[in-house]
Amino acid sequence: MIRKIALMVAGLSVVLSGVSCSTTQAAGRVVGYDKHGMPGYSDKVKKRKVRTTAYHAKEWDHKKYKSKSAAGTPLKYGEVRSAAADWSRYPLGTKFKIDGLPFTYVVDDYGSALVGTNTIDLFKRSDKEMRWWGVRKVDIKILEWGDFEKSEEILSGRRKYRHCRQMHDALKKRLSSASRLPTDA
């Protein structure tokens, strides 16, 4: 009940202020919630619960990119699969596994609806597979963090797009504080 009230108050402040619910970094614990009510985590936390959705290359907003990711590489669908996320939270190249599935996912794409959230969009080969997946809350394990600097470099050339500008600004802020960058150690 208290969490619901806190989320409602946070949602109201989002509506009033026009900014997203952000999280504050703290070592090893949940540090806030995004607009979907999903927890935010310290970068040191490798096991986390995230909201997942799915997309495919023939969706109306992906058609112009065909089967290419935001990184310019072919979308992957095999033992290693493509995923899209907010690069300021899960940078380009971040590898993770979903509990109960044999695949490794790699973040090589992003989407405007993902910015400011802990949602990860999983690449699927068809509309049918995408709809079958739907929206799921899953447990993931970060196997390897991606490259925040490379993510920032790519996004710096795409600042004319609002979602890219938002991720780029968040990355610049994050990179200015090296102690907040995750390490695989």
Image (cartoon, grey):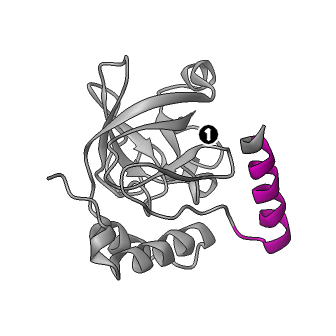
**Which quadrant of the structure image shows residue 76?**
top left
Residue sticking out furthest to the left = 185
Question: In the image, is 147 to the left or to the right of 62?
Answer: left
Question: In the image, is 103 to the left or to the right of 59?
Answer: left
Residue 13 in magenta stretch: yes
Where disc 1 sits, the SS reads: loop
Circle 1 is placed at which residue position? 59
On screen, residue 177 above or below 150: below
x, y percentage for residue 182?
27, 59
Question: In terms of depth relative to the viewer, which is nearer, 51 or 161?
Answer: 51
x, y percentage for residue 77?
35, 29
**Which quadrant of the structure image shows residue 157?**
bottom left
x, y percentage for residue 174?
39, 74
**Which residues make up the magenta segment?**
4-19
Residue 112 in magenta stretch: no
Question: In terms of depth relative to the viewer, which is nearer, 24 or 164?
Answer: 24
Question: In the image, is 147 to the left or to the right of 84?
Answer: left
